[in-house]
Amino acid sequence: MLLSLLYVLLSGIALPVGGIQMQYLWRNQLGDVYSLGLGSAACLGAAAATMSGWCSLTVGSFVCTLICTIICFFVTLRVSTQNLITFGIIFGTFIGSLGTIVVTNAPTGDLLKQYYLWGAANFHLEGVTTGDIFFSLALFALGFAAALGSHRDLTRHFNGEIELPAWRKAVALTMIMFLVTSAVSICGTIGFISLGVPNLSRIMCKSTDIRKHYLLSSAMGVGLLLITYIVVEYVNFGIYLPVSATMAIIALPLTVFLFTRNNK
């Protein structure tokens, strides 16, 4: 119970903070932590680890995400931001295809179910070891510290006051990967929170100071995930409710309200 709540808190902070950093790096509201294939890579690594048993699901997810990030690191050094977004979509599709091949060749139905329940996101922490938890907490600490340390330059870059060099963007991407993987490798890919919540934060708070969006989007992310956790665990109507899908449904009325209010 306490560990589940810990990862509700960690995921509610890590994913929105990573998402707002991507939006500031790209100066684009469609910036998302999964845009460069990180989510697909996490799923591929988790699938390979689950089906083969060569390592824990958490380690497999991290290793594959790290490889994806290294590739994106070098691509970031050589292409424009606009082309990087296009590359990320294509690259993510490629990695997702590999993951589909691995999953459809699952040796047993039980392994397929285990992978699917992780991929749909949950806070049950089945099969997660003490080493996995310490590893993910270390990743979170590194990624969050980097986010706080780079806030001034990210804000100035977003405002057009400076242009971050390619190597700084590549390093920032690596730190975002650490932050995101700290949650995804344990709980699975949680959609909406890394794209929708940062955008909601920017609608509610017009300041461009990224620190304010770290605070606001984290509060919203934790709140939404906590409500979702209560629903899937205690108000589930006797059926299994995946965290990611349930949260997107819960968040839809709020999203529609804020976007239409902002448009007026």
Image (tube, grey):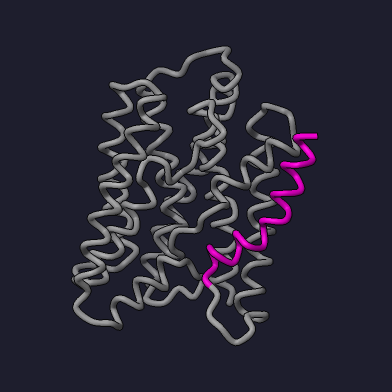
The residue depicted at 63 percent of the width and 40 percent of the height is 199
Residue depicted at x 67% and y 26% = 208
**Nearer to me, 136 or 111:** 111
- Which quadrant holds residue 160? top right
Image position of 139 (left or right of 11): left
244 shown above or below 216: below
What residue is at 65 percent from the left and 57 percent from the top?
222
Residue 75 located left or right of residue 34: left
Residue in front for this viewpoint, 262 or 193:
262
Q: Is residue 205 left or right of residue 94?
A: right
Q: Is residue 261 magenta?
A: yes
Task: Where is residue 242? Give x, y as percent.
Answer: 52, 71
Quarter occupied by the C terminus:
top right
Q: Position of residue 245 (x, y in %)?
A: 54, 64
Residue at screen point 37% across, 20% down: 80
**Does residue 171 sit above or below 45 in this rendering?**
above
The magenta region covers 242-264
| Residue 52 or residue 91, whichever sits in front | 91
**Residue 26 in magenta stretch:** no
Q: Residue 119: x percent and y percent? A: 40, 65
